[in-house]
Amino acid sequence: MNCLTFKMPYPPSANHLRYIKGKPIKTREYRDFIDSVVAGFIGRRDALDRADFYSVSIYAFPADRRKRDLDNLFKATFDALTAAKIWRDDSQVVEIYAIRGPAAVDPFLGIKIKSFIYPTCPDLIPETWGEKTRMYKWTKPVGSNIYIGDRWHKLDLS
């Protein structure tokens, strides 16, 4: 499992997207943001192993101290990373960690992306392990060990 760490410009708010017949109409600022991110990834697209699921950490440093909803960062950021072909679709992001830092003269996002493996709990393991439950087949225990996060753990099944 490897990870991709980088800085990108602070995104425009998703609050300004307009919808017509269910389709989002992106502003010029929104489209320019996506284009700048795509341009920054030319030649770096293979830096991250292809995976089925991803974990994303976002460290946001806005331009000022105005109140903002932290979740408004996700839409534009994930749209830009999808356009840059970091993943096939942003629905592959299954874990998000976000923190807002202090205001910065040059606002930016610090991003860390890594492949994700679902953790499991022995009490929640279904009887039909891995047959039709795609979520669980990635973390099937091997003997009395299970892979959680970035290392193997010993399971106490007593």
Image: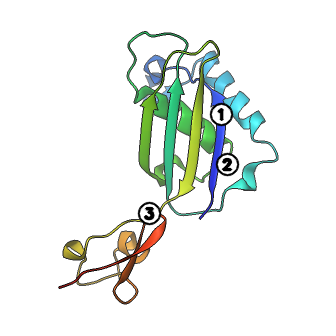
Tell me the amino acid under the disc marked 2.
Answer: Lys
Quarter of the rendering occupied by the C terminus: bottom left
Q: Between label 1 and label 2, give the one nearer the viewer.
A: 1
Estimate the spatial distance between the alpha carbons at disc 1 and disc 2, rounded to whole Å: 16 Å
Residue 144 position (above or below residue 119): below
Q: Are marks 1 and 3 in contact (CB under 8 Å)?
A: no
Name the residue: 45% across, 24% down.
19
Tell me the amino acid under the disc marked 3.
Answer: Gly
Looking at the rendered structure, the secondary structure element under dot 1 is strand
Where does the image place residue 138, in percent across and percent down from the top left? 44, 74
Residue 50 position (above or below residue 122): above
Write down the residue under mark 3: 149
- Residue count near mark 2 (Cα–Cα under 10 Å), binned few <14, some 14–19, many ≥20: some
Estimate the spatial distance between the alpha carbons at disc 3 and disc 2, rounded to whole Å: 24 Å
- Residue 51, numbered circle: none
Looking at the rendered structure, the secondary structure element under dot 2 is loop
Looking at the rendered structure, the secondary structure element under dot 3 is loop
Estimate the spatial distance between the alpha carbons at disc 1 and disc 3, rounded to whole Å: 24 Å
- Image quadrant in which you'd find residue 100: top left
Instruction: Examine the rendering and report whether any part of residue 139 can be seen.
Output: no
Q: Earlier in the sequence, mark 1 or mark 3?
A: 1
Name the residue: 48% across, 60% down.
116
Q: Earlier in the sequence, mark 1 or mark 2?
A: 1
Name the residue: 30% across, 79% down.
155
Q: In terms of depth relative to the viewer, which is nearer, 44 or 52?
A: 44
Write down the residue under mark 1: 7
Residue 116 position (above or below residue 99): below
Residue 30 position (above or below residue 50): above
Write down the residue under mark 2: 85
Name the residue: 59% across, 34% down.
110
